[in-house]
Image (cartoon, rainbow, N blue to C red):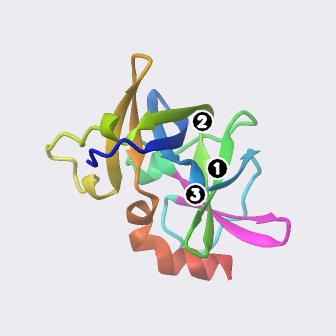
Amino acid sequence: MSEDNAVKQFISFTIGDEEYGVDIMAIREIKGWTPSTPLPEAPAHMRGVIDLRGVIVPIIDLRVRFHSGITEATPTHVIIVVAIGDLMVGLMADAVVDIVTVSGKDIQPVPDMDRQGHHGYLAGIVSVEGRMVVLLDLDSLLENDKDILAQAAA
């Protein structure tokens, strides 16, 4: 990972017992859970779409995307709306934890092990106050879904 000293900020959130982070600059909104409208023949990790002030936003269930089951949505769940290029996508999470501020040199590479194809969307790991936060690369995470997401948002 980069050895630069630039300060980076991430929003951290939980999915089960795991804590993840995404670049704060990609985040457009964090909102409480809103039921989504399912779309026929969508991938299992795509929960459906919501209308966010006139913009159709596809919702991704990260628990399904990470092969950890399906999220049983409750009113305490959140949707983290992120921008990936021109596309707005909602990431379903259990809860937002914190704003994490770290130096680029503090971001460690993901250990090289059999990650069942997950390594492409893991940008690094950072230790924050004794807890590990896995940083996600949103472009890579949703690379295979961009066409479907764009159609859902159209």
Q: In this view, does 150 lie to the left or right of 141?
A: right
Residue 128, above or below 55? above
Q: Mark 2 Cα within 10 Å, few/some/many (few <14, many 20+)?
A: many
Q: Mark 3 points at which residue?
A: 26
What is the C-alpha distance between the residues marked 2 and 1? 10 Å
The kind of residue tagged 2 is Asp
User: x and y percent of residue 52 in the render?
Assistant: 80, 63
What is the C-alpha distance between the residues marked 1 and 3? 10 Å
User: x and y percent of residue 63 in the render?
Assistant: 47, 45
Q: Mark 1 Cα within 10 Å, few/some/many (few <14, many 20+)?
A: many
Q: Name the residue under label 2.
A: 94
Which mark's residue is nearer the viewer, 2 or 3? Answer: 3
Residue at the farthest front position = 5
Q: Which segment is the magenta one?
A: 46-61
Which mark's residue is nearer the viewer, 1 or 3? Answer: 3
User: x and y percent of residue 39 in the render?
Assistant: 64, 71
Give me the residue at 38% from left, 38% from top. Answer: 134
Q: Name the residue under label 1.
A: 80
The kind of residue tagged 1 is Ile
